[in-house]
């Protein structure tokens, strides 16, 4: 997921500062997730502290909130300036992203304020969350990458105007 994210970040870098910042936050969130799930060296499966899990939940909610209440609006506005074909595509993608939101909110509700002894299913829940995040990030990347297409379309349009 980190490799794919870095490719997307490079591809759209500088096109929209808020999107750049949001993708950087996603990278930090992914690293935090990987540490909680024991997927980073030294690859030890250790029960995270209640505080670490609560912090991760806070960061997760901040990330999805920024998407729904800031970033998607910026992207939809960009699509509206382009044409309806892109706007219809963006609405379908946002519907797919929304499908993952409920599961993320459920994870947050379950683990944001939990006692250490109440985490018997954490490994399984983290694994499931990883799959959900992977799905969400795939759709978000499709949404964000249209910025690159719109930028290419605009550049072609600008050069056609200049050539005329």
Image: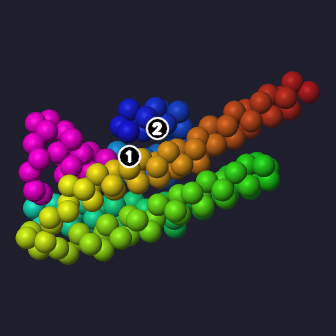
Judging depth in this view, the residue of 135 and 25 nearest the camera is 135
Query: As drawn, which residue projects farthest toward the top?
Result: 163
The percent coordinates of residue 1 (x first, y second) are: 38, 39
Instruction: Name above or below for residue 77 compared with residue 108.
Output: above
Q: In the image, is residue 44 part of the stretch drawn in magenta?
A: yes
Give residue 24's mark.
1
Instruction: Name above or below for residue 12 compared with residue 59.
Output: above
Mark 1 Cα within 10 Å, few/some/many (few <14, many 20+)?
Answer: some
- Which residue occupies 38% across, 64% down? 104
Q: Is residue 38 visible?
A: yes
The segment highlighted magenta reads 28-48
| Residue that badge 2 annotates | 9
Instruction: Name above or below for residue 160 compared with residue 97.
Output: above
Position of residue 7 in the picture relative to residue 74 (left or right): left
- CA gap, disc 2 and disc 1: 8 Å
Q: Quadrant of residue 42?
A: top left
Give the mark, 2 or 1, whose residue is nearer the N terminus.
2
Q: Is the C-beta separation of discs 2 and 1 under 8 Å?
A: yes
Mark 2 lies on a secondary structure that is helix
The percent coordinates of residue 115 (x first, y second) are: 11, 74
Quadrant that contains the C terminus: top right
Q: Quadrant of residue 93?
A: bottom right
């Amino acid at each position: 997921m980190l490799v794919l994210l870095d490719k997307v970040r490079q591809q759209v870098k500088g096109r929209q500062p808020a999107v750049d910042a949001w993708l950087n936050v996603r990278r930090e969130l992914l690293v935090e997730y990987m540490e909680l799930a024991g997927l980073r060296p030294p690859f030890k499966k250790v029960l995270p502290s209640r505080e670490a899990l609560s912090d991760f939940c806070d960061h997760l909610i901040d990330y999805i909130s920024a998407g729904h209440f800031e970033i998607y609006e910026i992207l939809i506005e960009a699509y509206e300036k382009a044409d309806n074909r892109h706007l219809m595509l963006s609405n379908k993608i946002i519907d797919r992203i929304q499908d993952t939101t409920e599961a993320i909110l459920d994870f947050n509700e379950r683990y944001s304020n939990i006692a250490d002894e109440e985490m018997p299913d954490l490994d399984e829940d983290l694994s499931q969350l990883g799959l959900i995040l992977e799905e969400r990030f795939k759709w978000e990347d499709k949404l964000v990458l249209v910025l690159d297409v719109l930028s290419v379309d605009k550049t072609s349009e600008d050069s056609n105007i200049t050539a005329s």
